[in-house]
Image (cartoon, rainbow, N blue to C red):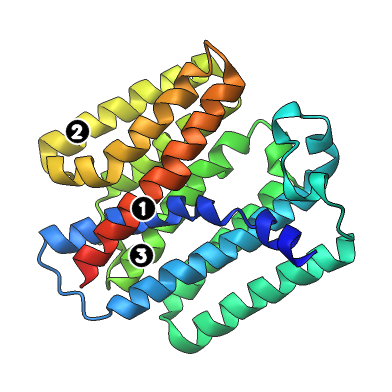
Amino acid sequence: MIKTLIKSTRMTWASKNANMFLLALTYAYFSNTPINNPFEILGGLVLVSVLWGALYTLNDLTDLDLDRGDRQKQDRAFIKNKVDKEFILLFVGILTSAVFIISFAAFPPAFTFIMSLMLINQLIYTVPPIRLKETSLAPFFSTATNSVLRLASCAVLLGNVFLVPISVYLFMYLAGMGTYLMYKSHSKDASLVAIMGGAVLLYMLYSGDMNLIQFAVAVLPSFLAAVPLYLSLFTNKESMFHLADILYHQVAMVFFLLCILVIVF
């Protein structure tokens, strides 16, 4: 049972958190902002990742009936191995409580506040009766909002949420929305958002809000991993999803962590 619960946290998906922490850290690096709290930043990354692990577990529980009928999700933890609902909720509660107790005790209030927003956003997105993921508002509250909050959580640990330019938050919001739309096979909407995101990217590069090195280390790897997602709109969906999962959640994860360690130390 414990193994199944741990699997449900999808810890390899912590690459999303590492990606956003790395992007924020590049702004500290290029602005010569001193990083005097490397262990707090790494601890923050761990806390955010554990919180998201708990939220992924909760998501798998609330989606269980739907996932049983989805051929691409038959490998989900609670489909392959039955775990009582009470144990799942207890597991989620323990992880979430531990994260916020540690955050309240050892981290800045702004960091705890942003993690609270992550929790609230995911609850209204996932849990009935609101459950925005089954409404037309889903693209606005899924990966898009979560990417912005992940980025902000590291920025506040660096001392200033606006260390990262507003245009970068907007770009990551659009990138997250585009990823969601591609995953849901909404090709027209995904293409429109991609055009908007491309325009914001050109603005960032032209205005200096993002330099080429930042683009190469923090944006390009996730862009390359998103290529199979885009191709899934036109070709074999299952194999493209699997390739995207390997590229972003495994290969890019190692790259992101190495870059983070280099910058903070």
Instruction: Nearest to the eye among marks 3 and 1: give it.
Output: 1
Q: Distance between the residues labelled 2 and 3?
A: 23 Å
Q: Name the residue under label 2.
A: 203
Q: Position of residue 41 (x, y in %)?
A: 34, 73
Disc 3 secondary structure class: helix
Q: Which quadrant, please, contains the C terminus?
A: bottom left
Instruction: Nearest to the eye among marks 2 and 3: give it.
Output: 3
Identity of the residue drawn at 24% across and 51% down:
165
Q: In this view, does 184 lie above or below 110?
A: above
Instruction: Nearest to the eye among marks 1 and 2: give it.
Output: 1
Identity of the residue drawn at 51% across and 37% down:
245
Identify residue type, mark 3.
Cys
10 Å neighbourhood of mark 3: few (<14), some, or many (≥20)?
A: many
Q: Is residue 43 above or below residue 66?
A: below
Left or right of 42: which side holds 238?
right
10 Å neighbourhood of mark 2: few (<14), some, or many (≥20)?
A: some
Residue 95 appearing in the image:
yes
Disc 1 secondary structure class: helix
Identify residue type, mark 1.
Val
Q: Distance between the residues labelled 3 and 1?
A: 18 Å
In this rendering, the count of numbered labels is 3
Q: Distance between the residues labelled 1 and 2?
A: 29 Å
Q: Where is residue 40 in the image (x, y as percent from the top left)?
A: 36, 79
Left or right of 246: which side holds 131?
right
Q: Mark 1 points at which residue?
A: 254
Q: Mark 3 points at which residue?
A: 154
Identity of the residue drawn at 35% across and 21% down:
195
Identity of the residue drawn at 27% across and 68% down:
160
Disc 2 secondary structure class: helix
The first of marks 2 and 3 along the sequence is: 3
